[in-house]
Amino acid sequence: MQELLKELVEKHRKTTELGKVASYIPELEKTNPRNLGIYILDNEGNEYFAGDYDNKFTVQSISKVVALMLAILDNGEEYVFSKVGMDPSGDPFNSIRKLETSSRRKPYNPMINAGAIVVSSMIKGDDAKDKFNRLLEFFKKITEDPSLELNPKVYLSESETGNKNRAMGYYLKSEGIITGNVEEALEVYFKQCSIDVTAKTIAKLGLFLANEGQTSTGEQVVSNRVSRIVKTLMVTCGMYDNSGEFAVRVGLPSKSGVGGGIVSVVPHKMGIGIYSPALDQKGNPIAGVCLLEDLCNELKCRIF
Ligand code: GLN
């Protein structure tokens, strides 16, 4: 396996040249676009890795998965999904247009920015700081990684340039979908996106979901049902408006982030973490997706 990963990283180093590092958050542009790494953890305790598996990058939209689980724990499934839908939007992750034109009013799903901002608004706590800390502690618990922390430079960069996210937050507040303090919701959202991780952290998150919400010590942190909901939304919406094609090519519940991460879940077997900051036009890691496709061909581990 270790050899296979090395080969695949070598092969797809070239694929990174077809993509571009996200630049709309200026701090993200400083990354080397040629970076590519993978980390795999399995249920037998084996760890396999290759390439830039040790580099730090911000978790970005992969945090939407973590925030969704915590929001459901805090509020229950029924309340959360009264404010955000469960269907693909067919639009880019940062699209604003359907918020006004769709008859359903609430954002289509929790994996696009509008839906994720609503989810962040539902995390409990005294103020934005407390809410974010609860999310960070939850993230540490499920990944069993006590070293996780905020990247303050990326956070500032996100907050300074996040005008579209702010616009969506205020619009959702005006429609009564966000009921609490909208600035707090945005602060939590920008901060959760700016947590530094490595491919291993992401693989741990994948293994947690592969084991139906259990940590390696056997603690059931979220129920089977919540874990199933999250994985289903990852399949249908996790790669934004490319989720259908991704499901055909890769066929694993996955979630990407513009920092270059992808978490993939092989149910009851493995968690996979990818780091691949050069993105395709939909904002997904271009080499990371190709690497996963080859890996699934080799391991025959697709869920379909
Ligand atoms: N922080 C980013 C944003 O809000 C997250 C987007 C992403 O990773 N797709 O635009």
Image: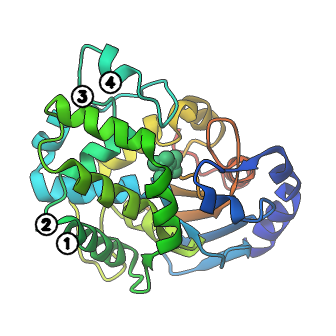
Q: Nearer the viewer, residue 104 or 263?
A: 104
Distance Cα–Cα, label 1 vs label 3 = 26 Å
| Amino acid bearing label 3 | Lys
- CB atoms of marks 1 and 2 within 8 Å: yes
Disc number placed over residue 125 in the picture, else none = 2
Specify whether 127 is left or right of 109: left
| Amino acid bearing label 4 | Leu
Distance Cα–Cα, label 4 vs label 1 = 29 Å
Please report whichever mark, 3 or 4, sits nearer to the chain's N-terminal start.
Answer: 4
Circle 3 residue: 106
Camera-nearest label, 3 or 4: 4
Disc number placed over residue 286 in the picture, else none = none
Q: Position of residue 216 (x, y in %)?
A: 37, 79
Q: Position of residue 168 (x, y in %)?
A: 34, 36
Camera-nearest label, 1 or 3: 1
Is the shortest distance between ligand 1 and the CB of mark 4 under 8 Å? Answer: no
Residue 42 seen: no
Distance Cα–Cα, label 1 vs label 2 = 5 Å
Q: Nearer the viewer, residue 168 or 68?
A: 168
Query: Quadrant of the image for the N terminus?
Result: bottom right
Distance Cα–Cα, label 2 vs label 3 = 23 Å
Disc number placed over residue 99 in the picture, else none = 4
